[in-house]
Image (cartoon, coloured by chain):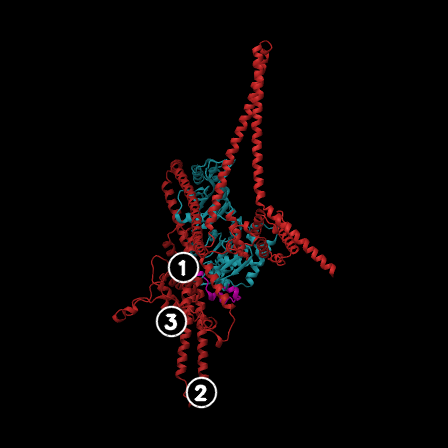
Chain colours: A red, B cyan
């Protein structure tokens, strides 16, 4: 009971009730204290309910009575199931008060509801503290610059904000971690021994950017880049890399080669589409040179050289044109008149030039046509000639074959009949032999093909197996990463909770309570065990009693009969029969007395318990109080009646 | 008669697909070169997993005709673990019906006995005697399958009914020994269409220009390039992006004929072509005339033109035509152009 009271008093103190230091248990609560405690609790639980009530007891009896009634009503509204009325507050007894206060304290709203759903993790904590700081700063009113205190200056000036300017940082090359950059910042001039210290080593990362303000931005960008590269590699490796069943280095080198090939192909196709267009020769040749430097150059050269005669001659004629035009332009430029010659001369000269150019044009077009006609003729004749050639070749081979056969036939012709018969026999013989050989070959071939098929099946089964194992491996990877994350989270949570726990106030020792509770639970369990044992013992005893009683009855009945039979004849037997009957009756009475004793003892115990409870109820003192109060009320009533009569 | 005929068959081979969905070249007699084997594996529908079964396809590679019949193995059979197989017959001549019938006989033998030895027996019987006993009643006789029948099996009437007047483009291209490429996604339609085309130039009776089933692989395209003029069928629609392969492109499902830029000048058509075109269309539209008769009509017209050309040639020295002689006759330019190229094709041109 001590513990319960201590907890109750503590909670009541937290609601605002002024419980004196010497009050250690509910037994010592006065009526005023009780009323104050209940009202404050009601106010905390339900402000609407408790606002109409006053924590202190008024002096007048009827007022007190009213306050008691309203408190009782309020408690019943809250849901208190026990018997409650004004007497609980004015004439209290310990058990009722204890149960009421326990009910109210349980109803008090829990403050721990907020604490339970705090997110774990360092980042959450950081964010929460940032949010708290910003809230605090925002809560401060804005002041004009002249009125600001130095502390406010820092937070309310626009000065500290900078734009996000990042610079690339150099990091030393690390073999273990993929993706880190090569060591830059190698010594610029190794010959200069005086600057060794400054140039031989890479400056620290915070000193690398040109402006100090861009350090955080550069660090953030660098880190984000590395993180995303690592994540991408993880994703790619887990999805495609594992499937390709190569080691990471092999996979990477293959990927690099693939990408290089693709780049080459793209450049090559771009270069190939160019050579058709006029005037793009320059860029095309640059590109082809570039591609030649990659290697694999003969392909480009072949494609360019494979054009038909037409395109080649086209190119030649067209390249002639610009050259000629250039020459003519140069000639024209040379014959440009100097500024002091007359205009007419100028015009005449221009006309001449025009005429000569037109003539040249005509000549050129004529020659073009001629050449075109020649080309046509030549292609067509080429076609014809190649066609003829092919046909002649084919007929040649055919004729050779037929000549060979005819030669053989001629050779065999003289002895025609015989040779024919011989030939037929030969043919049949070879046919048989071939069939024989085919059968023998089949004997070899069939098992080999079967073996091949069997091995193929095995191979495909193994493939299935390995892909299944691969998926298992993937699952395991996922599980591993999940468990690692969970472990990290739990560790973070644990650390956070430990710090919180250390920061908690130590006024109430929770561990003492929990130990006590566990003790009580253990005790209860032991008691339960004992009770069960006792119950089983009782059952056993009862069974024994029943069986013994039964035995007794049966034995007595048998004996009775047996003796009675003989009793009719023999006198001594009759006496023994009487003794037997008397014995039986006495024993029965004895047993009955014992049972009655037991019942009476039980009743005594119950009555003693009732006496104890009644004693605790302070009935006598309450009765006295009630009588006094009754007298006081009567006095008040009479006073009021007198006042009314007077008025 | 028997001797030159039977020497036309070159070899037979077997391709099997087993329960592991694995396709293998399992057997051949007497021998098939590695290159040809590769080509045949690519033509066999068992290696192409998307399409269904093509029971019979044929084609040409390096002047060898191949005929592939594919059969799905059904019970009762002596073959274990085989789900489908293809029988390949290679020969020097073009005669799809003959080889299809022969393949059927051999396939039945194979299914029944499960061993290629029986096939060898049948093959040698045909090779030596020209006759083979088949399991069902009757036997396979080579002499039942005349090559002329194979030539005439293609339907020119169908070609004309699909393309109408545009058939003259095909006719011109064939006469001038140009390169025609036909595309259709289904191989059966492609084979049927292309085999009828060389019949338009019946006077030559040359089916070696026919390559009805070609893929866009290097070896096959090399082979095509060695021929001056050809009719090639492609299942792959990518062939339309290869203008270096054709002078005339026929898109069969869309019924479109396009002439490539480089050949437009040689294929210019005029009044003469209109006349020929009319003859072709009228003859084909006549419901009473059979395919054979249509071909005959076309060949009559062709012979007229050739006779004309021959007479021109006789007037020249060497009996060869030159461009000047043609110009002297003052033909309209399209006709002159056509006759000039035709003379080259018929080897009447002076070099």
Q: The numbered mark 2 sits on a residue in which chain?
A: A
In front: A382, or A636?
Answer: A636
Give the spatial CA distance, label 2 vs label 3. 66 Å
As helix, strand or loop, the secondary structure at mark 2 comes to: helix
Q: The numbered mark 1 sits on a residue in which chain?
A: A
Q: Residues within 10 Å of mark 2 (few under 14, many from 20)?
A: few
The vertical placement of A27 against A543, above or below, is: below
Q: Kindly tell me whether residue A463 is visible in this rendering.
A: yes
Counting from the top left corner in percent of width and height, residue A415 is at 37, 38
Q: Where does label 3 land, which residue?
A: A210
Question: What range is drawn magenta here?
Answer: B318-337
Report whether mark 3 lies on the same chain as mark 1. Answer: yes
Q: Where does label 1 land, which residue?
A: A259
Q: Residues within 10 Å of mark 1 (few under 14, many from 20)?
A: few
Q: Which numbered disc, 2 or 3, marks the residue that appears first in the sequence?
A: 3
In front: B202, or A267?
Answer: A267
Q: Which numbered disc, 2 or 1, marks the residue that appears first in the sequence?
A: 1
In front: A534, or B111?
Answer: A534
Counting from the top left corner in percent of width and height, residue B113 is at 46, 35
Q: Where does label 2 land, which residue?
A: A346
Nearest-to-viewer mark from 3 and 1: 3
Q: The numbered mark 3 sits on a residue in which chain?
A: A
As helix, strand or loop, the secondary structure at mark 1 comes to: helix
Nearest-to-viewer mark from 2 and 3: 3
Does the magenta run of residues contain B327?
yes
């Amino acid at each position: 009971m001590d513990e319960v009271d201590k907890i109750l008093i503590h909670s009541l103190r937290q609601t605002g009730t002024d419980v004196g230091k010497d009050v250690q248990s509910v037994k010592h609560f006065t009526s005023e204290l009780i009323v104050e405690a209940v009202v404050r609790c009601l106010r905390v639980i339900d402000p609407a309910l408790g606002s109409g009530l006053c924590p202190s007891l008024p002096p007048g009896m009827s007022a007190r009575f009213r306050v008691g009634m309203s408190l009782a009503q309020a408690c019943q509204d809250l849901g208190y199931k026990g018997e409650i009325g004004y007497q609980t507050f004015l004439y209290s007894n310990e058990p009722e008060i204890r149960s009421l206060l326990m009910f109210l304290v349980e109803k008090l709203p829990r403050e721990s509801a907020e604490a339970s759903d705090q997110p774990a993790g360092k980042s959450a904590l950081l964010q929460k503290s940032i949010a708290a700081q910003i809230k605090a700063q925002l809560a401060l009113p804005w002041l004009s610059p002249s009125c600001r205190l130095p502390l406010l200056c820092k937070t309310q000036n626009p000065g500290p904000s900078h734009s996000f300017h990042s610079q690339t940082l150099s990091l030393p090359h690390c073999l273990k971690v993929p993706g880190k950059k090569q060591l830059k910042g190698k010594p610029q001039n190794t010959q200069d021994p005086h600057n060794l210290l400054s140039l031989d080593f890479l400056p620290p990362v915070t000193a690398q950017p040109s402006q100090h303000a861009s350090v955080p931005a550069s660090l953030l960008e660098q880190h984000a880049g590395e993180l995303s590269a690592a994540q991408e590699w993880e994703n790619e490796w887990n999805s495609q890399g594992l499937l390709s069943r190569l080691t990471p280095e092999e996979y990477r080198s293959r990927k690099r080669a693939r990408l290089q090939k693709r780049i080459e192909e793209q450049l090559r196709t771009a270069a190939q589409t160019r050579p058709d267009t006029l005037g793009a020769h320059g860029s095309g040749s640059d590109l082809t040179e570039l591609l030649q430097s990659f290697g694999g150059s003969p392909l480009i050269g072949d494609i360019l050289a494979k054009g038909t005669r037409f395109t080649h001659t086209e190119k030649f004629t067209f390249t002639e044109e610009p050259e000629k035009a250039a020459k003519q332009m140069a000639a024209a430029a040379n014959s440009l008149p100097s500024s002091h010659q007359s205009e007419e001369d100028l015009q005449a000269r221009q006309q001449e030039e025009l005429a000569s150019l037109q003539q040249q044009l005509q000549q050129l077009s004529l020659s073009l046509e001629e050449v075109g006609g020649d080309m046509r003729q030549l292609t067509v004749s080429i076609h014809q000639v190649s066609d003829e050639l092919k046909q002649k070749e084919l007929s040649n081979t055919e004729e050779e074959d037929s000549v060979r056969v005819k030669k053989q036939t001629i050779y065999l012709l003289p002895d025609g009949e015989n040779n024919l018969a011989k030939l037929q026999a030969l043919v049949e013989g070879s046919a048989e032999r071939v069939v024989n050989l085919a059968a023998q070959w089949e004997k070899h071939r069939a098992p080999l093909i079967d073996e091949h098929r069997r091995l193929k099946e095995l191979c495909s089964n193994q493939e299935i197996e390995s892909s299944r194992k691969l998926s298992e491996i993937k699952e395991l990877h996922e599980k591993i990463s999940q468990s690692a994350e969970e472990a990290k989270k739990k560790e973070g949570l644990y650390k956070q909770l430990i710090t919180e726990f250390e920061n908690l106030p130590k006024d109430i020792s929770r561990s003492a309570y929990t130990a006590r509770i566990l003790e009580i639970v253990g005790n209860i369990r032991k008691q339960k065990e004992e009770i069960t044992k006792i119950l089983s013992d009782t059952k056993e005893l009862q069974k024994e009693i029943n069986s013994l009683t039964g035995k007794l009855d049966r034995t007595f009945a048998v004996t009775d009969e047996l003796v009675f039979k003989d009793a009719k004849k023999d006198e001594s037997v009759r006496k023994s029969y009487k003794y037997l009957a008397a014995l039986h009756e006495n024993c029965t009475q004895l047993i009955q007395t014992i049972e009655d004793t037991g019942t009476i003892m039980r009743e005594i115990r119950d009555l003693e318990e009732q006496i104890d409870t009644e004693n605790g109820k302070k009935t006598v003192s309450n009765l006295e109080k009630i009588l006094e109060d009754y007298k006081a009320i009567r006095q008040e009533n009479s006073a009021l009646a007198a006042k009314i009569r007077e008025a | 008669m028997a001797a030159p005929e039977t020497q036309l068959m070159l070899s037979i081979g077997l391709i099997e697909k087993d329960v592991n969905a694995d396709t293998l070249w399992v057997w051949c007699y007497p021998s098939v070169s590695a290159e040809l084997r590769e080509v045949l594996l690519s033509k066999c529908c068992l290696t192409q997993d998307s399409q269904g079964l093509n029971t019979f396809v044929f084609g040409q590679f390096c002047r060898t005709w191949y005929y592939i019949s594919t059969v799905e193995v059904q019970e009762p059979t002596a073959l274990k673990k085989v789900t489908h197989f293809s029988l390949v017959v290679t020969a020097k001549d073009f005669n799809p019906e003959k080889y299809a019938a022969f393949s059927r006989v051999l396939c039945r033998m194979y299914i029944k006995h499960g061993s290629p030895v029986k096939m060898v027996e049948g093959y040698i019987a045909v090779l030596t005697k020209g006759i083979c006993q088949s399991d069902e009643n009757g036997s396979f006789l080579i002499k039942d399958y005349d090559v002329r029948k194979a030539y005439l099996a293609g339907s020119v009437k169908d070609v004309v009914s699909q393309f109408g007047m545009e058939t003259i483009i095909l006719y011109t291209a064939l006469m001038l020994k140009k390169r025609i490429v036909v595309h259709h996604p289904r191989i059966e339609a492609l084979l049927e269409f292309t085999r009828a085309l060389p019949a338009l130039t019946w006077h030559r009776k040359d089916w070696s220009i026919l390559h009805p089933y070609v893929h866009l692989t290097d070896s096959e395209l090399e082979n095509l390039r060695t021929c001056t003029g050809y009719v090639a069928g492609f299942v792959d629609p990518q062939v339309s992006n290869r203008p270096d392969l054709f002078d005339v492109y026929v898109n069969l499902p869309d019924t479109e004929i396009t002439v490539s830029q480089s050949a437009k000048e040689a294929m210019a058509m005029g009044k003469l072509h209109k006349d020929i075109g009319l003859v072709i269309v009228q003859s084909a539209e006549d419901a009473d005339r059979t395919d054979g008769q249509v071909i005959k009509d076309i060949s009559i017209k062709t012979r007229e033109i050739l006779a004309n050309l021959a007479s021109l040639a006789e007037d020249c020295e060497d009996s060869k035509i030159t461009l000047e002689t043609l110009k002297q006759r003052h033909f309209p330019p399209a006709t002159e152009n056509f006759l000039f190229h035709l003379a080259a094709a018929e080897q009447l041109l002076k070099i």
